[in-house]
Image (cartoon, rainbow, N blue to C red):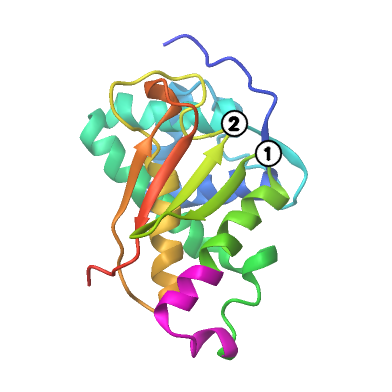
Amino acid sequence: MSRIEPSGYYYPNLMGRIYLQAMEEVMGRNGLNAILNLAGLSHLIDNYPPADLKKEFEFADFSALNWALEEMYGPRGGRGLELRAGRAVFALGLQGLGALSGVGDLAFKVLPLPAKLKVGLPALAKVFSQVSDQKSVVKDAGEHYTYTMHPCPNCWGRTADRPICFAGKGVIEEGLHWLSGGSKFRVEEIECVAMGGETCTYAIYKEPIG
């Protein structure tokens, strides 16, 4: 694939750094270096972005990482690795950021599960809207919530015949696991820009599955 055109949209350096650390945790340093080479991002080998909130990590580079995972490990293998890296992103550093910082305290922990989702999901979305160019919006759609990302860094500049934003799905799944105190929820991407959609949108079903 030719290089993905720059988007002009950015994550803070910290989010780029956390994603690279998460990928390294999932596939080892040599595996990650091979991915960085394939993605045309060899300048990031042993040279992760600094741990600051300056918006300098291009969405096109984030998307290229996900493309390279699928290219190297196949659609199924790449998808699994993106999900795992997305989960690790949340575990490694998101829960202390901004709107989520108060969510771990006791007052939140004693809320009933529906209230935790109602408060916690918008807090997760707000972190991305506040610190990055990914505007995230949560709406109540009855039996599920919708979580919309626009613009989306997961699939920027790519086309596909199926939803491909698995890193975002992993972040949301791990966020729900943490917010709920250990429950699992069904998260499905129901609209994807790579397929021609207007936005990248996930349905998050309210009833836990375990």
From the viewer's perspective, tell me whether residue 191 is left or right of residue 96.
Answer: left
Magenta stretch containing residue 89, yes or no? Answer: no
Give the quadrant of the N terminus. Answer: top left
Which is nearer the eye, 34 or 17? 17
Disc number lying in front (1 or 2): 1
Note whether 31 is above or below 39 in the view shown.
Answer: below
Magenta stretch containing residue 112, yes or no? Answer: yes
Which is nearer the eye, 28 or 191? 191
**Disc 1: which residue:** 133
Note whether 44 is above or below 171 in the view shown.
Answer: above
Q: Residue furthest right?
A: 54
Q: Residues within 10 Å of mark 2 (few under 14, many from 20)?
A: many
Tell me if residue 36 can be seen.
no
Give the x, y percent position of residue 6.
63, 19
**Residue lying at 42% horizontally and 54% vertically, measured from the top left:** 141
**Residue lying at 78% horizontally and 44% vertically, measured from the top left:** 54
Q: Residue furthest top?
A: 2
The amino acid type of the residue labelled 1 equals Asp
Q: In the structure shown, which secondary structural element does the residue marked by tag 2 occupy?
A: helix
Tell me if residue 55 can be seen.
yes
Q: Quadrant of residue 58?
A: top right
Q: In the structure shown, which secondary structural element does the residue marked by tag 1 occupy?
A: loop
**Disc 2: which residue:** 59
Asked whether disc 1 touches disc 2, contact meaning CB atoms under 8 Å apart, the reply is: yes
Q: CA distance from mark 1 to mark 2?
A: 9 Å
